[in-house]
Image (cartoon, rainbow, N blue to C red):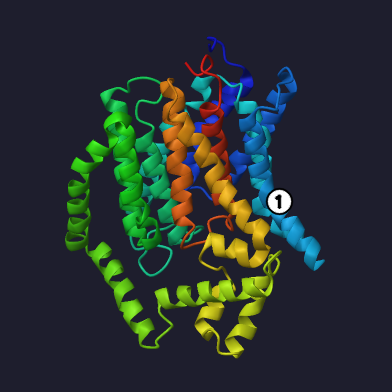
Amino acid sequence: MPTNKFTIEERILAIILFCYPVLLLIVKGGMNALFFLSLAISLIALFKQPRQPMNDGNTIAVTITLSSAMLALFLSQLYHGDFGLRHYDSASRLLLAIPIYLALRNADIRTLSWLQYGLPIGAISALLTILSMRGHYFYDGRASTAFLHPIYFGDLALMLGFLSLFSINWLKQDSKAIIALKTFGWIAGIYVSILSQSRGGWIAIPILLAVWLIFQNKKRGIVRLTYAFPLLLITLIASYFFVDLVQQRIDRIFIDLAAFSQGHADTSVGQRLQLWKAALYLYGQNPVFGLGPDGFANSMEALYRSGFITEEAAQLGRGEVHSQMLANLAELGIPGLLSILSIYFVPLFIFVKSTKSGSNIKRTAGMMGVCLTLGFFIFGLTVETFNIKMLVSFYSLTLVVLLAVATRGEDAAT
């Protein structure tokens, strides 16, 4: 059972967990700074805490999963004999999340619950920032900030919004004001996603909403979803016909596909299809350890000159593959694919189990964890989510906070 007294480390962690979603999309460097601050505070807390056992199944699974990216990267570099420390930026954040997780397992649950208030305020702050700077978007009229591409901006805002929705009644029955705040945070996240025109993230909206509806009453989840599905379908159709941005971006997909089928490959969709084909082709040349961290980008010139892809697609491919799984597969081989799959699905499995808990706190944390891991998996189908340090910091910190709640003992979670 939690005590009434908070340690100084818990107080600082509570402030961090409230602030990092708020600063995520509006302050450059804010997410990374708070990630490393949380790491420092966690290390201090671990030093002060009595030694805790680390041989339970969840801790072992989390530790192996969060270490796997570093291992896959090292194995690929070892195979190619080409080592570069800069490639470890993202993987190291997953690894450094382990001590944060170990410290948070023993933190007062009320400390961790401050995250639920930062989430909707973060989504609302992103919306207010965009509305206050109309006409000053990142490029081409798409909502973002000067330090973040519209795709990532829209996806992160959408995730803040849905985590807000999933967090309703986390510790206890929320007041009407808190429910309104979280609901508005959800709406703000969706609206920012629409303004960003990031179509890949929109795939997650009906899926995550369906998951939320099922979790509202597990015993009648399918029945509830059966009634809700027609309403959801009508809402999506109405969004297409009455929201110009949605209609334009969806129509563009079919126009691009039609152009691609007629040999016009240099559309937005066509370039991505070329890069995905290139990733599979290049993986076939190095099926075990991949091409190495820079291998895909370095192969673009040769593929363009051979006529395998167009010059525009090659230019795009020097930046990223536009698929997290295909990027891992092509660059790091089988270990890379296993790593990224484990980063999504091992925590997802743990979270699904915790949604069956008798503790409302653990159950809600499990629901939020399902939202986080499933959402990032969907985002990663059409963009590389772990090549941007702040995205990895956000995913890692949010993941271990929710895991720390979802995997604690029933007594500690009441």
Could one spot residue 100 in this view of the protein?
A: yes
Count numbered badges in the picture. 1
Instruction: Name the foreground residue: 252 vs 273.
Output: 273
Q: Residue at x 48, y 52 (%)?
A: 377
Residue pushed farthest right? 81
Q: Amino acid at mark 1?
A: Met
Instruction: Name the foreground residue: 370 vs 313.
Output: 370
Q: Position of residue 270 (x, y in %)?
A: 42, 78
Could one spot residue 390 in this view of the protein?
A: no
320 relative to 175, above or below = below
188 relative to 254, above or below = above
Q: Residue at x 54, y 40 (%)?
A: 347
Would you say 98 lies left or right of 225 here?
right
**SS category of the residue bearing label 1:** helix
Would you say 194 lies left or right of 87 here?
left
Task: Give the labeled residue for mark 1.
Answer: 70
Instruction: Name the foreground residue: 396 vs 146.
Output: 396
Would you say 258 lies left or right of 347 here?
left
Would you call the spot at circle 1 few (<14 residues within 10 Å), some (14-19), or many (20 or more)? many
Q: Position of residue 80 (x, y in %)?
A: 78, 67
Q: Position of residue 204 (x, y in %)?
A: 37, 52
Instruction: Name the foreground residue: 128 vs 249.
Output: 249
Q: Quadrant of residue 378?
A: bottom left
Q: Residue at x 70, y 27 (%)?
A: 54
Q: Position of residue 48 (x, y in %)?
A: 73, 19
Q: Quadrant of residue 184?
A: top left
